[in-house]
Image (cartoon, rainbow, N blue to C red):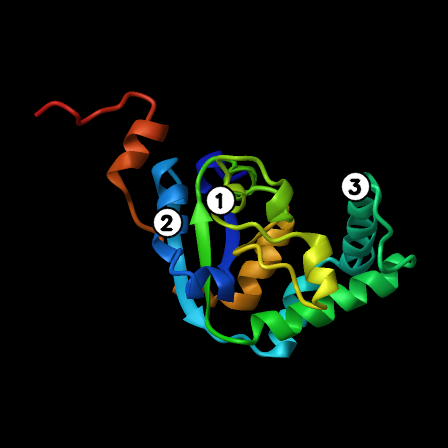
Amino acid sequence: MDHPKKERTFVIIKPDGIQRTLIGEIIRRYERIGLKLVALKMAVPDEKTVVKHYTVDPDWIRKVGEKSIISYQNKGLVAPFKDPEECGRAVLGRLKKYLTTGPVIAMVWQGNKAVGIIRKLTGGTEPLTSDVGTIRGDLTIDSYDMSDLDDRAIRNLIHASGSVEEAEKEIEIWFKKDEIFNYNLVLEKMLYDVNIDGIME
Protein backbone atom coordinates (compact mmCIF):
# COMPACT_ATOMS: atom_id res chain seq x y z
CA MET A 1 0.00 0.00 0.00
CA ASP A 2 1.27 3.48 -0.91
CA HIS A 3 1.92 6.01 1.85
CA PRO A 4 -1.03 8.47 2.29
CA LYS A 5 1.27 11.32 1.21
CA LYS A 6 1.24 9.78 -2.30
CA GLU A 7 -2.52 10.17 -2.84
CA ARG A 8 -3.25 11.99 -6.09
CA THR A 9 -6.22 13.89 -7.40
CA PHE A 10 -7.16 15.51 -10.68
CA VAL A 11 -8.27 19.12 -11.19
CA ILE A 12 -9.35 21.15 -14.21
CA ILE A 13 -9.45 24.93 -14.16
CA LYS A 14 -12.38 25.46 -16.52
CA PRO A 15 -12.62 28.17 -19.21
CA ASP A 16 -14.27 30.68 -16.84
CA GLY A 17 -11.40 30.31 -14.36
CA ILE A 18 -8.89 31.08 -17.09
CA GLN A 19 -10.86 33.94 -18.64
CA ARG A 20 -11.30 35.56 -15.23
CA THR A 21 -7.50 35.29 -14.64
CA LEU A 22 -7.91 33.17 -11.51
CA ILE A 23 -5.27 30.54 -12.36
CA GLY A 24 -2.71 31.84 -9.85
CA GLU A 25 -5.28 32.29 -7.09
CA ILE A 26 -6.60 28.74 -7.51
CA ILE A 27 -3.13 27.17 -7.58
CA ARG A 28 -2.06 29.30 -4.59
CA ARG A 29 -4.91 27.96 -2.46
CA TYR A 30 -3.95 24.36 -3.18
CA GLU A 31 -0.23 24.98 -2.69
CA ARG A 32 -0.44 26.85 0.59
CA ILE A 33 -2.21 23.99 2.37
CA GLY A 34 0.74 21.73 1.52
CA LEU A 35 -0.30 19.85 -1.62
CA LYS A 36 2.29 19.26 -4.34
CA LEU A 37 1.63 19.95 -8.02
CA VAL A 38 3.00 16.97 -9.97
CA ALA A 39 1.53 17.58 -13.46
CA LEU A 40 0.10 20.55 -15.36
CA LYS A 41 -0.91 21.27 -18.95
CA MET A 42 -3.08 23.68 -20.92
CA ALA A 43 -5.35 22.30 -23.63
CA VAL A 44 -8.57 22.93 -25.51
CA PRO A 45 -10.47 19.65 -25.03
CA ASP A 46 -12.54 18.10 -27.79
CA GLU A 47 -16.06 16.74 -27.18
CA LYS A 48 -14.85 13.12 -27.14
CA THR A 49 -12.44 13.87 -24.27
CA VAL A 50 -15.14 15.71 -22.31
CA VAL A 51 -17.58 12.78 -22.64
CA LYS A 52 -14.88 10.24 -21.71
CA HIS A 53 -13.91 12.36 -18.71
CA TYR A 54 -17.41 12.78 -17.27
CA THR A 55 -18.52 9.20 -17.90
CA VAL A 56 -15.58 7.42 -16.22
CA ASP A 57 -18.28 6.59 -13.69
CA PRO A 58 -20.93 4.76 -15.76
CA ASP A 59 -23.62 6.03 -13.36
CA TRP A 60 -22.53 9.68 -13.64
CA ILE A 61 -25.40 10.75 -15.92
CA ARG A 62 -28.03 9.39 -13.52
CA LYS A 63 -26.23 10.67 -10.40
CA VAL A 64 -25.74 14.21 -11.71
CA GLY A 65 -29.38 14.29 -12.80
CA GLU A 66 -30.57 13.19 -9.36
CA LYS A 67 -28.29 15.73 -7.66
CA SER A 68 -29.64 18.54 -9.84
CA ILE A 69 -33.29 17.61 -9.21
CA ILE A 70 -32.72 17.35 -5.44
CA SER A 71 -31.00 20.76 -5.41
CA TYR A 72 -34.11 22.32 -6.96
CA GLN A 73 -36.42 20.56 -4.48
CA ASN A 74 -34.31 21.72 -1.51
CA LYS A 75 -34.82 25.32 -2.65
CA GLY A 76 -38.57 24.84 -3.09
CA LEU A 77 -38.26 25.15 -6.87
CA VAL A 78 -39.53 22.96 -9.71
CA ALA A 79 -36.71 21.21 -11.56
CA PRO A 80 -36.72 21.57 -15.37
CA PHE A 81 -36.49 17.75 -15.68
CA LYS A 82 -38.31 14.99 -13.82
CA ASP A 83 -36.23 12.10 -15.20
CA PRO A 84 -32.66 12.01 -13.78
CA GLU A 85 -31.28 10.38 -16.95
CA GLU A 86 -32.75 13.10 -19.17
CA CYS A 87 -31.45 15.76 -16.80
CA GLY A 88 -27.97 14.17 -16.72
CA ARG A 89 -27.79 13.99 -20.52
CA ALA A 90 -28.73 17.69 -20.72
CA VAL A 91 -25.97 18.53 -18.21
CA LEU A 92 -23.43 16.55 -20.25
CA GLY A 93 -24.47 18.34 -23.44
CA ARG A 94 -23.95 21.71 -21.79
CA LEU A 95 -20.57 20.63 -20.40
CA LYS A 96 -19.40 19.56 -23.86
CA LYS A 97 -20.23 23.00 -25.21
CA TYR A 98 -18.69 24.80 -22.21
CA LEU A 99 -15.40 22.95 -21.91
CA THR A 100 -14.61 23.09 -25.63
CA THR A 101 -14.99 26.89 -25.86
CA GLY A 102 -11.37 27.61 -24.94
CA PRO A 103 -8.32 26.51 -23.00
CA VAL A 104 -8.52 24.64 -19.71
CA ILE A 105 -5.71 23.79 -17.30
CA ALA A 106 -5.45 20.15 -16.24
CA MET A 107 -3.50 19.37 -13.09
CA VAL A 108 -2.53 16.49 -10.82
CA TRP A 109 -2.06 17.29 -7.13
CA GLN A 110 -0.47 15.00 -4.55
CA GLY A 111 -0.55 14.81 -0.76
CA ASN A 112 -2.30 13.30 2.25
CA LYS A 113 -6.05 13.06 1.56
CA ALA A 114 -5.52 15.07 -1.65
CA VAL A 115 -8.96 14.20 -3.05
CA GLY A 116 -10.88 15.33 0.04
CA ILE A 117 -8.69 18.37 0.72
CA ILE A 118 -9.11 19.69 -2.83
CA ARG A 119 -12.88 19.12 -2.69
CA LYS A 120 -13.06 20.97 0.63
CA LEU A 121 -11.02 23.93 -0.63
CA THR A 122 -12.94 24.06 -3.92
CA GLY A 123 -16.44 24.10 -2.39
CA GLY A 124 -19.79 22.72 -3.53
CA THR A 125 -20.71 22.32 -7.19
CA GLU A 126 -23.09 25.30 -7.09
CA PRO A 127 -21.12 28.48 -6.33
CA LEU A 128 -24.13 30.34 -4.91
CA THR A 129 -24.49 27.82 -2.07
CA SER A 130 -20.76 27.12 -1.57
CA ASP A 131 -19.30 28.05 1.80
CA VAL A 132 -17.47 31.33 2.28
CA GLY A 133 -13.75 30.56 2.33
CA THR A 134 -13.95 28.05 -0.51
CA ILE A 135 -12.75 28.93 -4.01
CA ARG A 136 -16.24 28.77 -5.50
CA GLY A 137 -17.84 30.48 -2.50
CA ASP A 138 -15.37 33.37 -2.65
CA LEU A 139 -14.77 33.85 -6.36
CA THR A 140 -18.00 33.31 -8.29
CA ILE A 141 -21.79 33.56 -7.91
CA ASP A 142 -23.39 31.31 -10.52
CA SER A 143 -26.41 29.15 -9.64
CA TYR A 144 -28.25 26.12 -11.03
CA ASP A 145 -31.45 28.04 -11.70
CA MET A 146 -29.62 30.79 -13.63
CA SER A 147 -27.60 28.32 -15.70
CA ASP A 148 -30.75 26.31 -16.47
CA LEU A 149 -32.62 29.49 -17.43
CA ASP A 150 -29.80 30.30 -19.87
CA ASP A 151 -29.49 26.65 -21.04
CA ARG A 152 -25.78 26.45 -20.24
CA ALA A 153 -23.36 24.67 -17.92
CA ILE A 154 -22.85 26.12 -14.49
CA ARG A 155 -19.71 28.26 -14.44
CA ASN A 156 -18.04 27.07 -11.27
CA LEU A 157 -14.35 27.54 -12.20
CA ILE A 158 -13.08 24.03 -11.38
CA HIS A 159 -13.58 20.30 -11.76
CA ALA A 160 -12.14 18.19 -8.94
CA SER A 161 -12.18 14.39 -8.70
CA GLY A 162 -14.74 12.91 -6.30
CA SER A 163 -12.76 9.85 -5.19
CA VAL A 164 -9.31 8.27 -5.46
CA GLU A 165 -10.63 5.76 -8.02
CA GLU A 166 -12.22 8.53 -10.10
CA ALA A 167 -8.99 10.55 -9.94
CA GLU A 168 -6.93 7.61 -11.22
CA LYS A 169 -9.24 7.15 -14.22
CA GLU A 170 -9.37 10.88 -15.00
CA ILE A 171 -5.59 11.27 -14.76
CA GLU A 172 -5.17 8.47 -17.34
CA ILE A 173 -7.43 10.37 -19.77
CA TRP A 174 -5.51 13.63 -19.53
CA PHE A 175 -1.89 12.67 -18.82
CA LYS A 176 0.71 10.16 -20.01
CA LYS A 177 2.81 8.57 -17.27
CA ASP A 178 5.92 10.51 -18.27
CA GLU A 179 4.03 13.81 -17.86
CA ILE A 180 3.61 13.23 -14.10
CA PHE A 181 6.70 14.09 -12.06
CA ASN A 182 8.17 12.56 -8.91
CA TYR A 183 10.29 15.14 -7.11
CA ASN A 184 11.01 16.38 -3.60
CA LEU A 185 9.76 19.57 -1.99
CA VAL A 186 11.31 20.95 1.20
CA LEU A 187 7.83 21.52 2.68
CA GLU A 188 7.22 17.75 2.55
CA LYS A 189 9.85 17.30 5.28
CA MET A 190 7.75 19.42 7.64
CA LEU A 191 4.54 17.62 6.69
CA TYR A 192 5.69 14.01 6.49
CA ASP A 193 9.20 13.29 7.87
CA VAL A 194 8.99 11.45 11.16
CA ASN A 195 12.13 12.95 12.73
CA ILE A 196 12.24 16.29 10.84
CA ASP A 197 15.97 15.79 10.19
CA GLY A 198 18.06 18.44 8.52
CA ILE A 199 16.63 21.70 9.85
CA MET A 200 19.76 22.71 11.78
CA GLU A 201 23.11 23.01 10.02
Q: Amino acid at mark 3?
A: Lys
Q: Amino acid at mark 1?
A: Ile
The residue that mark 1 highlights is 135
The residue that mark 3 highlights is 75
Q: Amino acid at mark 2?
A: Glu
Helix, strand or loop at label 3? It is: loop
In the rendering, at what x and y percent does residue 115 appear? Answer: 55, 43
Horizontal arrangement in the rendering, residue 169 relative to residue 198 (left or right): right
Residues 27 and 48: in front is 27
Instruction: Give the Cα separation between the discs numbered 1 and 3.
Output: 22 Å
In the rendering, at what x and y percent does residue 86 appear? Answer: 86, 65
Callout 1 crowding tier (Cα within 10 Å): few <14, some 14–19, many ≥20: many
In the rendering, at what x and y percent does residue 147 appear? Answer: 68, 61
Horizontal arrangement in the rendering, residue 89 relative to residue 188 (left or right): right
Q: Residue furthest left?
A: 201
Horizontal arrangement in the rendering, residue 139 relative to residue 152 (left or right): left
Residues 17 and 9: in front is 17
| Badge 3 vs badge 2, beta-carbon distance below 8 Å | no
What residue sits 59% from the left and 51% below the top? 161
| Badge 2 vs badge 1, beta-carbon distance below 8 Å | yes
In the rendering, at what x and y percent does residue 121 appear? Answer: 50, 39
Q: Earlier in the sequence, mark 2 or mark 1?
A: 2
Could you tell me if residue 178 is visible in this image?
no
